[in-house]
Amino acid sequence: MADIFVSYSRTDKATVAPLVTALEAQGWSVWWDPEITPGDEFDRLIGAELESAGAVVVVWSPASVESRWVKGEARDAADRGVLVPVRIENARLPIDVRAIHTIELDGWAGNGDSAPFKALRIALEAKLKRAVGKTAAQTAKDKRPAVTVCVLPFANMSGDPEQEYFSDGITEDIITDLGKVSALSIVSRNTAFSFKSAAADVAQIARQTKAAYVLVGSVRKSGARVRITAQLIGAANDSQLWGERYDRDLNDIFALQDEISKAIVAALKLTLLPGERQALEQRGTTHPEAYKLYLMARQFWLLDNERNDVIVDRICNRVIEIDPNYAQAWATMALAQWNRFWQGDSDAGERAAATALRLDPNLADAHAAMGAAQRSKGRYLEGLASCQNALRLEPGSYIANKIAGLCCLGLRRYDDAIGHFEAAAAGMETDFTAATFVSQSYKAKGDAERMRSAARRALDRIERVVVAEPGHSRAIGLGVAMLVTLGEKERAKEWATRARLVDPDNTNLHYNLACAMSSLGEVDLTLETLAGIAPRLTPSMMSWMEADPDFDPIRAEPRFKTLMEEVKARFAKA
């Protein structure tokens, strides 16, 4: 069975062949052009190869978008979380896949060093998880047929919508735990959570995800008590293989998670390999209160709204008061502090990241947090090295790819930046920031067509965020830049006015508005906006301003030079 399954229209064979050659040159095996007569045997072979592939590259072209076979293979891959779509000939994507980040391959011309191919390579590495040095358990997993399980988001039965963070956190931890069992193949978190609040029944979900079993459950938390119910349902006959209800004290939450994972393994009659039982019992903290609060902080962090960073920081500070050795809490706090670099103290984020690394050198988020802190000080090479350490530990890390892209953008290594931003956007369906920087990177390269295509994809995501949260200042601010890129000037100005009213004291927001005005060619308005925030610019912001390609059109402007000199003089005096 091959690493990569390539789905395409036979009429595009000559175009796809160089792509396959380039992928094989990376050391991957590729299934794409079987010499076999169509029929039942052909269908069985395609089904087996499609299901076993670690990644599915769908080549969208004007011909393939009309193919029901290609569409079906794309849906199957998306459901299993292994889809990596690319587009050629500016094909109009099917409506049900337009929200999925797609890599533009027009113009790559068979060049393995081109930005589009680098983006594809990084996305595939994330899917295939080609970490250096497999563990014994991973090697055994390659040899044993895996049982596929889809863990659906546990329903929040607490009667309080604010407790959703807790039920979601329990679900994610069970997904993580079961993923440590080599005999199991767990449907990805993104795919599983796409069924949250959906009306689809278990049998339908199993068909869509190709899961043999579906785990459903609920969480009811009331004070210091928690009730968790769980059922493992066989997809073949829609019957319950295992089910249990647990009524426990919240202090027993970790033992309870262990029990659920081990009960599922036992129900499936699987044998844990040496080390897997211990891996199931490993926790970042043994303090239930610290764990509960961390889940709350993580929920705020995932919303990616700058207003939430102070909340994340405050909650994580309380978490580490309870458990000073909780490395994940330190790393998340460091990332929240980095996200506030426009407010001043970038040293705090570096100190928190260093603590996370000392507590757990193998925590990918800790390395990414250190990369973020270094990036905020203009140390882009050091930041990139830290992110590369994170990606070696967790090849698909969303935050590590995003920070690595920012470091590459600061270094003006635009092709590398595009690759990392594309991987980040592909790895997190709700991301809009990395998707925005894809467009900015193409703009810096002078590739207007890809710049606009990426801007349209980013704006689609931004609009969904703003509909759900009309006061999301980061999304609105970046949306202004994408509207400018797409030539929607009047709408961009309306959004800019809205942004100033929504979050008038957000220096970073006004910085982003200045970037958009610069792109519009509005020199006076750009300088006016920058002058308004100049007294609040921090050294971190200045280091980025000096590298930001958005201001390249006005760098020779005397008023811009004067503004930069005055801000630096203020720093020197301080």
Image: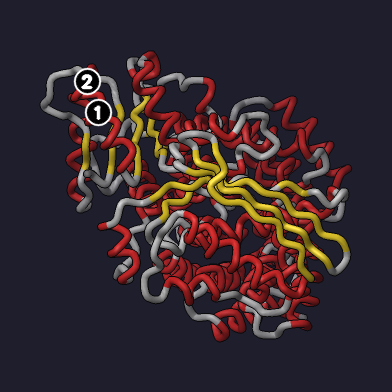
User: Where does the image place residue 290, in percent across and percent down from the top left?
Assistant: 74, 75
Residue depicted at x 54% and y 32%: 203
| Pointer 2 residue | 40
- Hey, which quadrant is residue 346 in on the image? bottom right
Does residue 137 lie above or below 432 as drawn?
below
Residue depicted at x 65% and y 52%: 230
User: Where does the image place residue 282, in percent across and percent down from the top left?
Assistant: 55, 76
User: For the residues marked 1 and 2, what is the alpha-carbon distance in whole angstroms?
Assistant: 6 Å
Does residue 214 lie above or below 531 as drawn?
above
Please state which amino acid type lies under the numbered disc 1: Arg
Q: Residues within 10 Å of mark 2 (few under 14, many from 20)?
A: few
Viewer-nearest residue: 175 or 410:
175
Q: Is residue 140 left or right of residue 152?
A: left
Does residue 195 lie above or below 290 as drawn?
above
Location of the N terminus (image quadrant): top left
Residue depicted at x 19% and y 24%: 41
Please state which amino acid type lies under the numbered disc 2: Asp
